[in-house]
Amino acid sequence: MTPDQTTQAILYVIVVLIFAKLFGEFAERLKQPAVLGELIAGVILGGSVLGWIRINTGHSLPPQLAVLTFLAELGVILLLFEVGLDSDLEEFLRVGPSAFLVATIGVIGPFAAGYLVSSLVFHVSTIVSVFIGATLTATSVGITARTLSDLNQLHTKEAKIILGAAVIDDVLGLIILAVVSGMVSSSSGSISLWEIGKTALLAVVFLLSAIIIGIRITPFLLKVAKSLYTRGMITISAFLFCLALSWIAHEIRLATIVGAFAAGLILAKTEDQAHIRHRIEPVADIFIPIFFVMLGLSVNIAYFNPFNPEARSALGLTGTLILVAIVMKVISGLGVLGRGVKKLVVGVGMIPRGEVGLIFASLGLSRGIITVDEYAGIIAVIIVTTFITPPLLKAVFSFHRRNAA
């Protein structure tokens, strides 16, 4: 880069972080997750509002914007690394079959409904319909946990099932993402059962192998890191391990975030988990907001203008997908086994989409699977499902308390 381009890249980073934190704070004060504020910050900075940072989808990026894109990629890797670090495989096993069944229904239902609505009703191409269905699968662990915490309900059976199922369907969602990515990357670009089966098997084998091998070698690696005198060696070693698995995942045609998630799961089993998490958080707090702002930059708000005849069909698809996204997750609550657990609470708790859904949308846009309009529609689904969940959960808990009184 030239000196002028370097200066402009630095200015972009300053503006993005300031807007991300300001709008994130505003969202938090409205008792909404900061990620929504960061998305809105990106929309405002983008070409459809202020136009301070313009991204022309499908064109090569100038170097100063390529820097932002790279920082955003680091952000998404750190995001999934943190999700893995916060995940406890043994806790999910203790939750029992209910969480797995809720997660399975919560993945298959939205995926199938999203695909059928897109392809049969709105006549979207097969590969795009598959991708749209995939974006509806994952529940946001962070948003659900934050809402349950605010309601003082984290101790309940419903909360344990919701959180267990949310993480399980994130894992299933990542496997679906790996399959879709493999289909898009294939030389034919077509969908075949062989390619789907091969990629799904590859994703499962990669996750299992990484976890089994990683759990055995990471204690030794961390022991070596702790024996060194250079400051920050444990943090650097954990970050390098995350990047290494992300690179391996990419090399075998899986998404990099699958590797990052696996690295987090592995390090979560070590005695240094709390130390790593504490040291990684400040780094993640810088790069993750850049990722979400970059997602917002690509949204064109003209898509949401009902007076534009060209936007009406796309708005119809978006509205239908929002309905599908809500209803199919509520139905997943029927997967709860046994008595004494409020199935409606579990179903409502599974509604919010979030980080993984945004990652799906970002991947689809960057690889040319979906258009800018379809991307904006997916973002709308994620925003709406996130906004409505806190008041809906509060109302459902209040309803059950009144009936119990």
Image (cartoon, rainbow, N blue to C red):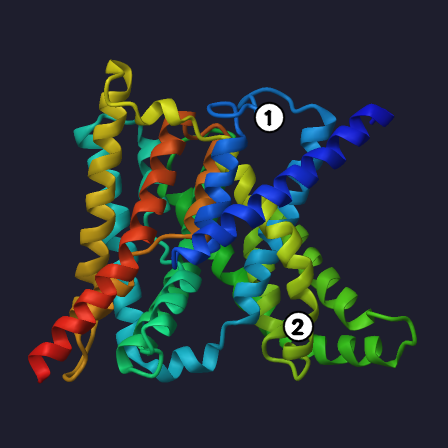
Amino acid type, callout 2: His
Amino acid type, callout 1: Trp
The residue sitting at 56% across, 38% down in the picture is: 294
Residue 163: % across, % down? 37, 71
Q: Residues within 10 Å of mark 1 (few under 14, many from 20)?
A: some
Residue 179: % across, % down? 44, 47
The residue sitting at 26% across, 39% down in the picture is: 115
Depth check: 36 or 57 in front? 36
Q: Name the residue beneath numbered marker 1.
A: 52
Location of the C terminus by quadrant is: bottom left
Q: Name the residue beneath numbered marker 2.
A: 278
Residue 403 position (above or below residue 344): below
Residue 52 position (above or below residue 38): above
The residue sitting at 62% across, 65% down in the picture is: 263
**Chain-order first, disc 1 or disc 2:** 1
The residue sitting at 23% across, 22% down in the picture is: 312
